[in-house]
Amino acid sequence: MWRPGRWPRWSSRAACHWASTASGSRTATAIPDPRATWCGSREYPNVRSVKVVRDGREELVNVDSAPDVVVVIGGGRMGAGIAQVFAGLGSEVSIVESSDEAASAARRRVADGLAKAAERGALPQDPETVLGRLTVLTDFAALPPQADLVIEAVPERADLKIDVLTRAEARVGPESVLATNTSSLSVAELGAALREPGRFVGTHLFNPVPASKLVEVVVAPQTGDEVVRRVRGWVRALGKTDIVVRDSPGFATSRLGVLLGLEAIRMLEEGVADAESIDKAMELGYRHPMGPLRSTDLVGLDVRLAIAEYLHATLGERFVPPQLLRDKVAAGELGRKTGRGFHDW
């Protein structure tokens, strides 16, 4: 993190100007990138915030809440989205993947996401400049030890998550926050495998990460208060809203979302209505931004099945996966990522 009296490597004095607030305190106005154009100096060591433009509105962001170095383990759709938003904020980001081929694919996902964001006018900097802050790795030994945040986004398997988290913990410094993007697994049980579970927390982001507004911060009994404070600050620096929930199966969002999604699949299975009608019922009747079947396609039918199986084992029969869901996963119809799920994409 930045310390008074030291210019960050990414700052640019020429791009900044001072503005006084009504209280007389100074803030720095940075356009277009809150990190690349941030102002601070020995003369004004207490400057901590920048004014940035998001969705056409100016807002003040606390620069202390933006992590300098972020590691994302897993570069699939979710991991690439996480990497994209932190790189866009100005963080140096490393994605860790299992092979050169997977690492190249992860980089392409981030590049594609940045290009689309630029087309929508949602990226204040040139995509290539943001992409320059991204590194892809295949070796945990190359992890930056000074990482502020290490977040895993590998498939929803406890053994796999524990493996990558313990390997990462052995490579980063004692101040690094370790986080899981699990959408249902016990944060306490994952953290129990770590040497320092007090710095471990759940950070449940949503697909697509750049567009989503919510992050569920999942607090296990051993999670330290300072870790929660830091993570909530990072979430807000991203322009997202955080909710803090106690570690329990499915947390708040998956528990409710999966239950609705499974019932929608059963309705389709029973011939109550077709997929389009079931989704429209919730979109138009209850003002949901997306119907439960389309949402399942976006999440991935395999991911939803894995979550449902875990919730079934921990919370009972109300979460038993419908046979139609199992059949589609077995047939490789996994939703948007394969071109077909409950809808064609």
Image (cartoon, rainbow, N blue to C red):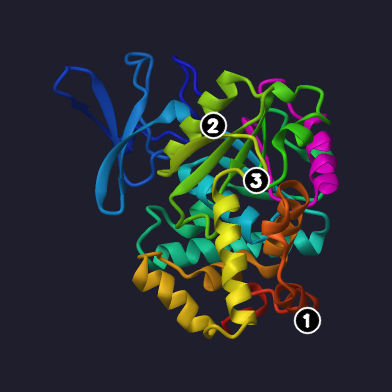
Residue assigned mark 3: 181
Residue assigned mark 2: 231
Label 3: how many residues lie within 10 Å, few (<14), some (14-19) or many (20+)?
Answer: many
Nearest the viewer among 82 and 138 is 82
Q: Tag 3's secondary structure? A: loop
Q: Tag 1's secondary structure? A: loop
* N-term-proximal mark, 3 vs 2: 3
Q: Tag 2's secondary structure? A: helix
Q: Is residue 153 magenta?
A: yes
Count of numbered circles in the view: 3
The quarter of the picture where the N terminus appears is top right
Q: Which residues are magenta?
A: 147-175
Question: Can the viewer see residue 340 in this picture?
Answer: no
Determine the residue positioned at 37% across, 23% down.
48
Vertical placement of residue 151 versus 254, above or below: above
Residue 183 at x, y = what percent? 64, 49
Vertical placement of residue 283 versus 169, above or below: below
> In the rendering, which numbered label is found on residue 207?
none
Residue assigned mark 1: 331
Determine the residue positioned at 51% across, 24% down.
229
* N-term-proximal mark, 2 vs 1: 2
Label 2: how many residues lie within 10 Å, few (<14), some (14-19) or many (20+)?
Answer: many
Vertical placement of residue 117 versus 60, above or below: below
The residue mark sitting in front, 2 or 1, is 1
| Amino acid type, label 2 | Val
Q: CA distance from mark 3 to mark 2?
A: 13 Å
Q: CA distance from mark 3 to mark 1?
A: 27 Å
Nearest the viewer among 48 and 286 is 286
The residue mark sitting in front, 3 or 1, is 1
